[in-house]
Image (cartoon, rainbow, N blue to C red):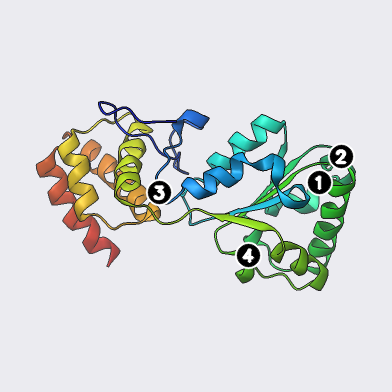
Amino acid sequence: MKMEANQIPRQLAFDLPSRPALGKSDFFISDCNSIAVKLMEDWSNWPNRQHILSGPSGSGKTHLALVWAKSLSANVINISDFFDIDLQKVTSASLVIEDIDEQQGSPELENNLFHLFNMLLANNCYLLLTGKKDPKFWKVNLPDLRSRILGMRNARLLPPDDKLFLALIAKLFADRQIYPKPEVLQYIARHGERSFSAASRLVVFLDKAALSEGKKISLKFTASQLHKFNDLQS
């Protein structure tokens, strides 16, 4: 997962209506996410075989979770589908539950989650939870479940630093089969809003604008469109 000097930097695959690469080698490691990656790779030493991965939308939680799930042949479900699962079946293997902080604090859901935690422990299986917010902000009312979650180790993906933000932009374009010149990527990195979600929206905006106007995503085109994009966001 190292980057050669003459290569376009790689980074996380993001949630876009395109075809992002989700392999381990497609995850770019920078200072802002290296600790989270190390903790994920240290899964054999997770306390109670349970772990939390948190971070903003588009930060690579799903990417890392899927890489981890593949390595352990784990099941992957979203919290929105939790009511439809068979607890006995899903706890027979290691498990990823995504977007757990989007659940509404239903008593039935929380009771089932608590039972799931215990069943996975009894079966010597691993559990990975993902969410946008830090666990202390999750809406969990069942005291035993909240205590269990707050006792889990959390790896947080931080906002992008310079290297990761440039890699992010390059990869977002590449996922749409677009390869702008380095000067375009650098311009966006200098003048674009420094967030995963804003970068995702900007790349989609530039792609649609270029197709609509029949133009390439050049430096001049990008500069003019970035002003329009920022006006729309304000």
In the visual, does 105 lie left or right of 188? right
Q: Nearer the viewer, mark 4 or mark 3?
A: 3
Q: Quadrant of residue 217?
A: top left
Distance from disc 4 to disc 3, alpha carbons, whole Å, reads: 22 Å
Which is more toward the observer, 49 or 27? 49
Above or below, comparing residue 139 to residue 7 in the picture = below
Answer few, some or many: residues within 10 Å of disc 3's Cα (few below 14, many 20 plus, some between 14 and 19).
few
Under mark 1, the amino acid is Ile
CA–CA distance in space, label 4 to label 2: 26 Å
Residue 92 place in picture, x, y as percent: 85, 38
Point 14% across, 37% down: residue? 218
Q: Which quadrant: the N terminus?
A: top left
The disc, 1 or 3, on the residue closer to the chain's N-terminal end is: 3
- Dot 2 corresponds to which residue? 89
Residue type at the position of mark 2: Lys
Identify the residue position indicated by label 3 in the image: 31
Question: 231 or 125, which lies in front?
Answer: 125
Q: What amino acid type is highlighted by mark number 4?
A: Pro
Label whose residue precedes the other's in the sequence (4 or 1): 1
Between disc 4 and disc 2, the foreground one is: 4
> Which labelled disc corresponds to residue 135?
4
Residue found 18% across the figure and 33% down from its top = 181
Alpha carbon of mark 1 to alpha carbon of mark 3: how far?
38 Å
Q: Position of residue 35 (x, y in %)?
A: 51, 49
Q: Residues within 10 Å of mark 1 (few under 14, many from 20)?
A: few
